[in-house]
Image (cartoon, coloured by chain):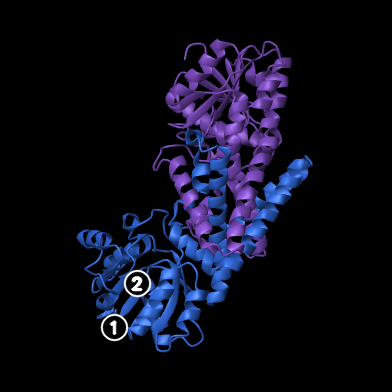
Chain colours: A purple, B blue
Amino acid sequence: MSGMRNIAIIGLGMMGGSLALSIKKSMFDCHIIGIDIDGSTSQQALTAGIVDAVASELKLGVAEADLVVLATPVGVSIRLLYQLYELGFNGIVTDLGSTKQALCETAIKLPGLKFVGGHPMAGSEIVGIIGANGTIFENAPVIITPMSDTDQTSVDAVCLLWERLHAHITVMDPVEHDHVVSIVSHLPYVAAIATMNAAGNLAQEKFAMFSFAAGGFRDTTRIAAGDPTMWRDIFCTNRSRIMHSITELKSQLDVLEQALLSQDGAQLLDFIKQAQRRRKCAVVPNSNVGMA
Amino acid sequence: MSGMRNIAIIGLGMMGGSLALSIKKSMFDCHIIGIDIDGSTSQQALTAGIVDAVASELKLGVAEADLVVLATPVGVSIRLLYQLYELGFNGIVTDLGSTKQALCETAIKLPGLKFVGGHPMAGSEIVGIIGANGTIFENAPVIITPMSDTDQTSVDAVCLLWERLHAHITVMDPVEHDHVVSIVSHLPYVAAIATMNAAGNLAQEKFAMFSFAAGGFRDTTRIAAGDPTMWRDIFCTNRSRIMHSITELKSQLDVLEQALLSQDGAQLLDFIKQAQRRRKCAVVPNSNVGMA
């Protein structure tokens, strides 16, 4: 990729590690520098050949970089934008975070910083570099969220990166993005953690009971295993929309509760059939999208 | 299996079809008769070699049977118990239903009927004979729920059947069973259908939005695709316990909502971490259990 030989990835967790592996597979001419606050994670990534070099300091790590990818929780990414601005970093900056408005509105206040927000809709609930997987972005949707004054050359370069990794790119306004993910991503996470905490209380923490759980329990709660700091930052940067999703979820539970309370079998069946119909509309069977 | 050569399976949906296929794989000496209210389903099962014979009438179908398996929604199974009693059926009767108390308490009122409740914790959200899969019961937990006066020879015979299919048997009281499944199975289903209906409302039924959904959405809502009549009957026969699960789920959503409202990042992180810890306790990674 012309003009994008040196890529620095900040945060060598599941997402950053997966991106490094994906780039290694598809873009042989790139040199990847990994930067992580945990030195042992950096060493692990280097030893495993996930990155070509590591740096313990931001300044050193990005010195030669054409592109910096923030693969950190959104709260950390916001702080890193300020730091890159203060360093006078001249290359392109993108990220992998699950909320975009807060980050893009930070970037707009930092003149000259060439930031292009990105969000690959793929991942895994496995926390850390151990979850790195070089195939999760293949055929996955990736949303790119330029602002009106974002440098077009930078947008094109970030799109080219994802094209090379065989992802499917959609360009979207950051505000619209955060609205969409509050429904298709943050709502299911809310359901998963609330279900898991409710189940733990109802079972009085007797976890042996869950040996009788089948795939339904396992799948419904899978994303509750995800990285807590990442999710805390998602809640903090998409707070009002997620609260709206919670209100709607509670209101649906009220409808269900009312049907049970009044022993209204027809209303109950309508609710169930509506969910079944909507699931069929929303999820195309065997669609090849990434996990989490 | 001595004394159990002729098995009649009533209801050739995903569960009944899967049982027929499983028996065909492991118990070559059995003859399986399929009975379904839908004649075309019966013919499909016969043509595909899933069953050895079909019958359109209960009386004909069970005439030669040593064992009758009810693979119908629980409401139908309750009616079938009465019908088998009226026919003076002399063999063993078991079922695959997700609630046990209502069925077992019906059976106890029918003197001479040799009923042993059973519940394999496996399945699939694919509705109908098309979802039949001869491997889903392998290594799956199966709960058997005899009552104090249940004929022990019948209990042994039903256990032997599941052993031959390589399932893992646990004997449990029907009331305890219904309590456990209200937490490990019915609660996740409640979460899945409420999430799906909330998502549909929030998206204003614009399902194109869900092309951006990753595996988190797909997994969290997977069981919402399950058979509506089956689930309606589960709700009706485990009503008060499921209402208790809904109350607890709503109360967990209240806790989450409160943390967001008060912008209490520490409380939010505690809630998330508790869910993550409990998920790790409840679900052993890579455990080989059946789906749904």
Which mark, residue B164? 2
Q: Earlier in the sequence, mark 1 or mark 2?
A: 1
Q: Residue at x 49, y 61 (%)?
A: B232
Q: Nearer the viewer, residue B229 or B273?
A: B229
Q: Nearer the viewer, residue A227 or A55?
A: A227
Q: Chain of mark 2?
A: B
Give percent across and percent down for residue B145.
Answer: 49, 77
How many numbered discs, if any? Answer: 2
Residue B227 position (above or below residue B8): above
Q: Position of residue A114 (x, y in %)?
A: 63, 14
Give the alpha-carbon distance from disc 1 to disc 2, as whole Å: 14 Å
* Secondary structure type for disc 2: helix
- Type of residue at label 2? Arg
**In the rendered structure, the residue with mark 1 lies on which chain?**
B
Q: Which residue lies at the image location 47% right of the left edge and 45% below the top edge?
A: A279
**Image point 32% across, 62% down: which residue?**
B17
Is residue A40 or residue B148 the one in the foreground? B148
Query: Can residue B283 be seen in the rendering of this structure?
Result: no
Q: Is residue A154 above or below residue B255?
A: above
Residue B51 image position (x, y, % from top left) = 25, 66
Q: Answer yes or no: is residue A119 visible.
A: yes
**Quadrant housing residue A98:** top right
- Foreground pick, A261 / B173: A261
Give me the disc on residue A4: none
Choose top left, top right, bottom left or bottom right for residue B66. bottom left
Instruction: Look at 54% across and 47% down and name the residue there.
Output: B197
Are the residues tagged 1 and 2 within 8 Å (C-beta)? no
Q: Which residue is mark 1?
A: B3
